[in-house]
Image (cartoon, grey):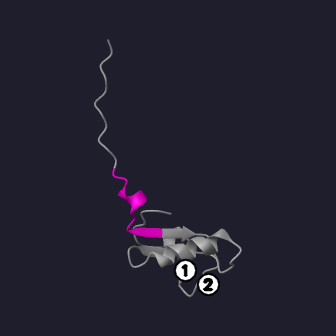
């Protein structure tokens, strides 16, 4: 008979369901794009979590500064 492998420890799902920091890649000022709606919703969740907006243009989105890439965030991000 084959021995069963030890049960894996449960995973911490807090970063998925209660992230301390989120990044919105594709943040946009255009109300017709999902990047605009998601950015607005993420910003509304502050101060419960840090929000980083990522836009390749680098222009402010919804009056908030953006990063040109996720690598430019320079902070730990739980959920993208």
Location of residue 20 in the rendering, given as x and y in whole percent from the top left corner: 37, 68
Location of residue 36 in the rendering, given as x and y in whole percent from the top left corner: 63, 75
Left or right of residue 75, residue 63 in this image: right
The stretch drawn in magenta includes residue 60: no
Location of residue 78 in the rendering, given as x and y in whole percent from the top left corner: 42, 63
Report the front residue among 54 and 71: 54
Residue at the right extreme? 32
Q: Secondary structure at mark 2?
A: loop
Residue 27 in sight: no
Instruction: Provide the residue span drawn in magenta.
Output: 12-22
Indicate the quadrant where residue 61 lies: bottom right
- Circle 2 Cα neighbour tier, 10 Å, few/some/many (<14 / 14–19 / ≥20): some
Indicate the quadrant where residue 10 lies: top left
First reached walking from the N terminus: tag 2 or tag 1: 2
Q: Residue at x 53, y 84 (%)?
A: 65
Location of residue 57 in the rendering, given as x and y in whole percent from the top left corner: 65, 79
Report the front residue among 38 and 5: 38
Q: Is residue 51 above or below residue 19?
A: below
Quadrant location of the N terminus? Answer: top left
Residue 70 in sight: yes
Residue at the top extreme? 1
Q: Residue at x 36, y 58 (%)?
A: 14
- Res 59 label: 2
- Res 66 label: 1
Q: Residue at x 43, y 78 (%)?
A: 46
Say if mark 2 contacts mark 1, CB within 8 Å. Answer: yes
- Res 35 label: none
């Amino acid at each position: 008979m084959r021995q069963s492998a030890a049960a894996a420890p449960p995973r911490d799902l807090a970063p998925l369901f209660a992230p301390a920091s989120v990044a919105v890649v594709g943040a946009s000022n255009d109300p017709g794009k999902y990047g605009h709606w998601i950015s607005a919703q993420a910003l509304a969740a502050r101060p419960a979590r840090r929000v980083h907006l990522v836009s390749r243009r680098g222009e402010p989105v919804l009056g908030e500064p953006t990063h040109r890439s996720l690598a430019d965030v320079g902070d730990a991000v739980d959920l993208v």
